[in-house]
């Protein structure tokens, strides 16, 4: 079996983050891997062709990004044993492209993502990030099924 030195976990800030990180911690402990916890934030408005707006809007967005980064750092400290090297990354951009690019930059050996159970029609008309990552990622992908709150 191939050695797993770097694990990239793509998260969204929701209640399922602990489940994904539990898998990452178990694998990292077995292989002595480093874990990168990545959250992709929405790109800047001017990046997608919109005017950035007044300064106070930009200040609010900057505060939100700083808080998300602090949350990533807390997640690494809370969910991982001190023996596991873990680092949180917050990057703005398009979700699928950013995750694939970071996996390459970090020389990740495994990508862990959560996947929601949706109907065929929902997947047909909306972007399914997990499915797109499966198509575009060049490394093994571990997709963890996540229960939606409505299904519980």
Image: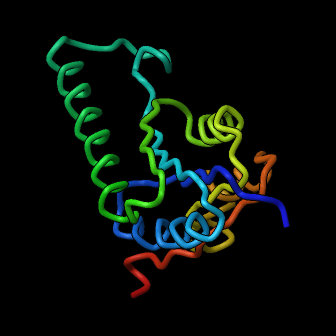
Residue nearer the viewer, 34 or 36: 34
Where 67 sits versus 149, above or below? above
Image x and y of residue 3, in percent = 77, 58
Q: For the N terminus, give its image quadrant.
A: bottom right
Which quarter of the picture shows residue 70? top left
Residue nearer the viewer, 145 or 5: 5
Residue furthest right in the image: 1
> What residue appears at the point 59 percent right and 50 percent down from the top-left corner?
8
Image x and y of residue 11, in percent = 47, 54
Relative to 64, is 5 on the left or the right?
A: right
Image x and y of residue 51, in percent = 36, 12
> What residue appears at the point 72 percent right and 60 percent down from the top-left corner?
141
Where 14 sits versus 129, above or below? below
> What residue appears at the point 42 percent right and 44 percent down from the top-left corner?
88
Q: How many marks?
A: 0
Q: For the C terminus, give its image quadrant.
A: bottom left
> What residue appears at the point 40 percent right and 22 percent down from the top-left corner?
44
Residue nearer the viewer, 3 or 142: 3
- Which colour assignment does the render follow? rainbow
Image x and y of residue 22, in percent = 48, 72
Which quarter of the picture shows residue 115? bottom right
Which quarter of the picture shows residue 140? bottom right
Residue furthest left in the image: 56
Residue nearer the viewer, 145 or 86: 86
Where 130 sits versus 120, above or below? above
């Amino acid at each position: 079996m191939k050695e797993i030195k770097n694990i990239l976990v793509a998260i969204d800030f929701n209640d399922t983050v602990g489940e994904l990180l539990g898998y990452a911690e178990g694998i990292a402990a077995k292989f002595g891997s480093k874990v990168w916890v990545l959250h992709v934030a929405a790109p800047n408005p001017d990046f997608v062709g919109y005017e950035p707006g007044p300064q106070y809007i930009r200040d609010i967005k900057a505060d939100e990004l700083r808080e998300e980064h602090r949350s990533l750092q807390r997640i690494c400290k809370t969910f991982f044993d001190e023996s596991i090297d873990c680092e949180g990354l917050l990057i703005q951009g398009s979700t699928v492209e950013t995750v694939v690019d970071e996996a390459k930059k970090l020389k990740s050996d495994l990508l862990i993502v959560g996947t929601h159970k949706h109907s065929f029609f929902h997947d047909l008309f909306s972007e399914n990030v997990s499915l797109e990552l499966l198509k575009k990622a060049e490394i093994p992908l571990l997709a963890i099924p996540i229960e939606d709150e409505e299904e519980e």
